[in-house]
Amino acid sequence: MTRPGRILLAALALAALLPAGGRGQPGSAGAETPAAIPWTLLIERPGGARARLDFLVAALTPADAERAVAAALRALPVVPAAPGVSAAWRPWGWAWSDAELPVPVAYNPAGAPSVVGPQAVIAGLRAWSSVEGSRFAFRYAGITDRTASILDAGPDGENVISWAHLPCDRGCVLGLTSKEEAREVDILLNSNPNALAELGLDTVLDWRTVILHELGHMAGLDHSCPAPWGPCTPDEVAAVMYFQYTGTNRVLAPDDRAGLRALYPAEPPPSGSARRVALEPGWNLLVAPPVPPADLAARLPCLVAAYAFDGAAWLRWAPELPAQLRTLAVFPSEVPVWLLASGACAADIAPS
Ligand SMILES: [Zn+2]
């Protein structure tokens, strides 16, 4: 799939795109209001460094969202995908190590709308740094004059939030998070005020909500409800990490906090010791103990399916699958996996 010399490797999550008002999500935009739509791309730079881009797009239709992403990409130093180059949506699996905590984040206010100050960034950093039961923390690294690496040749060693004037075409990229293979994450926010006003978003959009959401990606969280799979539970829809912008949401929801605790529990479990695994109804993203899925299901009766990404393909497990389709033999070590639960259940699981 990789083509040497091409910068853009892959595209996207078409299944994630919903028309405005689709599926009747609580709080989702009606037909008159632009809906925010997630969009994920993997890029590969000439030097080989790969990055994942998560776009948050406001548009009335998926076609408008696609045009908005294309317009924004033309303004960035990445090349649009060659025809026929595609890949399925996939997670970008690394999480910050203990040695990297607290994760420093610097802010470049150049171009910011007058209503957004460093306080919006600091509030977001604080929210994700004070989740009870999680050891995760950000550290505000102050004002920087560097910009998000997607505007540059590649990662520069600093996690940066910066602004750029991105063109909009009937839809608008509100922000994007780039997660570099080189363990750097940057956030680029769109300072194009006219476009937001044209979309009727200038009075609706709460930048603190957008920044809080993008910081969740920076911490290592994906969306609360994996869009291609759904349906989403009410808890997932209420989450800051829900894939669609549904209005001002400046407080982390239980689902957001549970996600952060799963990635960064307060005490890292000593290797060889039992680990508490608690599942909520619906999809759960967590690091599972390195045991066969059937062993986990024997202790967790609510577990009905498991998916893990091995870097190239989705591996899956479900009791009703024929043996040859149960491609997930053992949960990977320290990599988050998706577990589907029919209800709530929990158990302490020791590695086998
Ligand atoms: Zn997102």
Image (tube, helix red, strand yellow):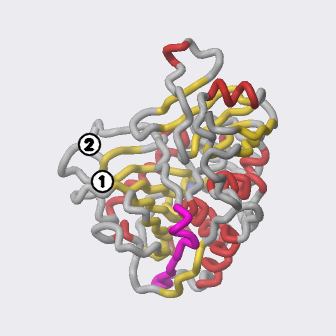
Q: Nearer the viewer, residue 255 or 72?
A: 255
Residue 98 placement, left or right of 127: left
What amino acid type should be assigned to the residue bearing mark 2? Thr
| Residue to which mark 2 is pinned | 2
Q: Residue at 54% of width from left, 31% of height from top?
A: 330
Q: Is residue 317 above or below residue 50?
A: above
**Residue 231's mark?**
none
Q: Position of residue 266 (x, y in %)?
A: 70, 61
For the residues marked 1 and 2, what is the alpha-carbon distance in whole angstroms? 8 Å
What amino acid type should be assigned to the residue bearing mark 1? Glu
Whether residue 252 is visible here, answered yes or no, is: yes
Badge 1 or badge 2: first in the primary sequence: 2
| Residue to which mark 1 is pinned | 44
Some atom of ligand 1 lies within 8 Å of the CB belonging to the residue at label 1 = no
Q: Nearer the viewer, residue 23 or 123?
A: 123
Is residue 107 one of those drawn in magenta?
Answer: yes
